[in-house]
Image (cartoon, rainbow, N blue to C red):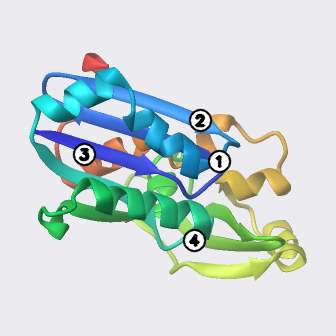
Amino acid sequence: MLDIFISSVTSQLSVLIFSDRINYFKKVEDKDFLVELPKIFDNDDVKKILKDDILGNIFILSKVGKLTGMRIGESFAKGLIFGDDEGKLIRFNAHDVLGFFSKSENKILSIIKIRKNSYSLALFSNRNVFRRISRDFELQGDELKNYIERNRFFLIGEGAKDFLPSIDEKYLFPDALKMFHYHRGINGKDNGFDTCM
């Protein structure tokens, strides 16, 4: 049984195909997702994986991010499960995936740019235990800049680059690998992925 993870809500597109027998990871950045996503699945290795295994679930990001990328990811995922159980399509919030992978801090602000000068945000704490502090909310550029200056946050997410250009790249994208680990973490499964990849 294989699971597919598709991240398409930021400027980075990534796909992870994971099963007990094999795993395949691919990411592309700043390209046309409508062209690139089908290309990932039009690979001989991927075709063989899909042909030889039973599809478990498809995980996508939704709720926040670039709307076009979100639609492309969801449409493609629905195409993969066409004629199958729609319950196999599982949606994660991109902020939750990012927050889960931040370092241990009391106040973490996840920032995802959704339109020109408009950002989706969520607050988390990852001190001892991961928890969400706020619902998703939106601020414009100047409001967000003031909000960041008034508070001491650890910033994560691609939108944080607009306010902290030196941000470590590992905190920017809710990629397919992070989605996999988030899924395993919230479902209490051991994290055996590092040893088999």
1 and 2 marks in contact (CB < 8 Å):
no
Q: Is mark 1 on a helix, strand or loop?
A: loop
Q: Please identify the quadrant where the C terminus is shown.
A: top left
Q: Is residue 125 visible?
A: no
Q: Which amino acid does label 1 sit on?
A: Asp
Disc 1/disc 2 C-alpha distance (Å): 9 Å
Residue nearer the viewer, 190 or 127: 190
Q: Measuring from the top left, give residue 79's x and y in whole percent.
A: 31, 58
Q: What crowding class fits label 4: few (fewer than 14 Cα within 10 Å), some (14-19), or many (20 or more)?
A: many
Which of pointers 4 and 1 lies earlier in the amino acid sequence?
Answer: 1
Position of residue 156 relative to residue 169, above or below, is below
Disc 4/disc 1 C-alpha distance (Å): 27 Å
Question: Could you tell me which residue is drawn at 27 percent across and 30 percent down?
Answer: 47
Q: What crowding class fits label 2: few (fewer than 14 Cα within 10 Å), some (14-19), or many (20 or more)?
A: some
Label 1, on which residue? Answer: 32
Label 3, on which residue? Answer: 184
Q: Which amino acid does label 2 sit on?
A: Val
Q: Measuring from the top left, give residue 60's x and y in whole percent.
A: 38, 58
Q: Is mark 3 on a helix, strand or loop?
A: helix
Position of residue 188 relative to residue 149, above or below, is above
Label 4, on which residue? Answer: 122
Q: Which amino acid does label 3 sit on?
A: Arg
Which of pointers 3 and 4 lies earlier in the amino acid sequence?
Answer: 4
Which of pointers 2 and 4 lies earlier in the amino acid sequence?
Answer: 2
* Residue 88 sits in quarter: bottom left
Question: Could you tell me which residue is drawn at 47 percent across and 50 percent down?
Answer: 7
Count of numbered tags: 4
